[in-house]
Image: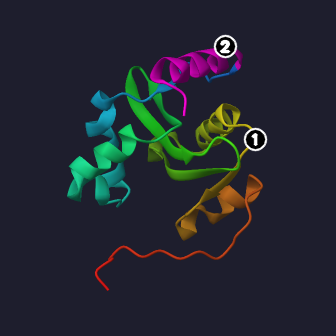
Amino acid sequence: MAGDSDKAAQIAFLLKDLNLPDGINLREWAPADFPVIQALSSAEGWTTPQSRPVEALRAWQNSWPVLVLTADEKIIGFLRALSDGEITTYIAEVLIAPEWRGQGLGTLLLETCHRLVPDTRFDLLSVEKSVSFYMTHGFREFWGFRKSDFTG
């Protein structure tokens, strides 16, 4: 995995070519962003960042690529991924604040992430209400499994 300065350089290089909507900025996340990420996640009904804040923050710190979208310095969306850089990138979280949806910002995050790890496929889990978004962006459904309790 690239060092922090390499990651920042990759994002800076990509940003030169991005056609961002007026007033929208995209950048690598910073730990100071985490309280807003927690609030946006909670508003969406995602409980882990609030119920397990130490672990969730560590997850963000150990992930790559990790991006935030801002408007007037306010975070309006984010993407957290895990990638081996060669075959698979797992999109762990992608969220756009409700009032900003439908403007191509989710697509922007996914495309930017893919440009950072261009030779990988994307895997993700999604809630049912997001199926049409992913299907229109070339994703296909496949079966998966999840286990949260490892006591038995």
24 horizontally vs 120: left or right = left
In the rendered image, the vertical position of residue 144 relative to residue 68, given as above or below = below
Q: Quadrant of the C terminus?
A: bottom left
Instruction: Name the image quarter holding residue 46.
Output: bottom left
Label number found at residue 16? 2
Q: Quadrant of the N terminus?
A: top right
Q: Position of residue 141 (x, y in %)?
A: 70, 70
- Secondary structure beneath disc 1? loop
x 47%, y 74%: residue: 146
Q: Position of residue 88 (x, y in %)?
A: 66, 51
Does residue 117 show up?
yes
User: Which label's residue is closer to the chain start, 1 or 2?
Assistant: 2
Q: Amino acid at mark 2?
A: Lys
Q: How far is the residue under mark 1 from the one under mark 2?
A: 21 Å
Q: Residues within 10 Å of mark 1 (few under 14, many from 20)?
A: few
Label number found at residue 48? none
Q: Position of residue 60 (x, y in %)?
A: 38, 42
Label number found at residue 119? 1
Q: Amino acid at mark 1?
A: Asp
Q: Nearer the viewer, mark 1 or mark 2?
A: 1
How many labels, in total?
Answer: 2
Magenta: main secondary structure equals: helix
What segment carries the magenta color? 1-17
x 69%, y 21%: residue: 19
Q: Position of residue 34 (x, y in %)?
A: 30, 37
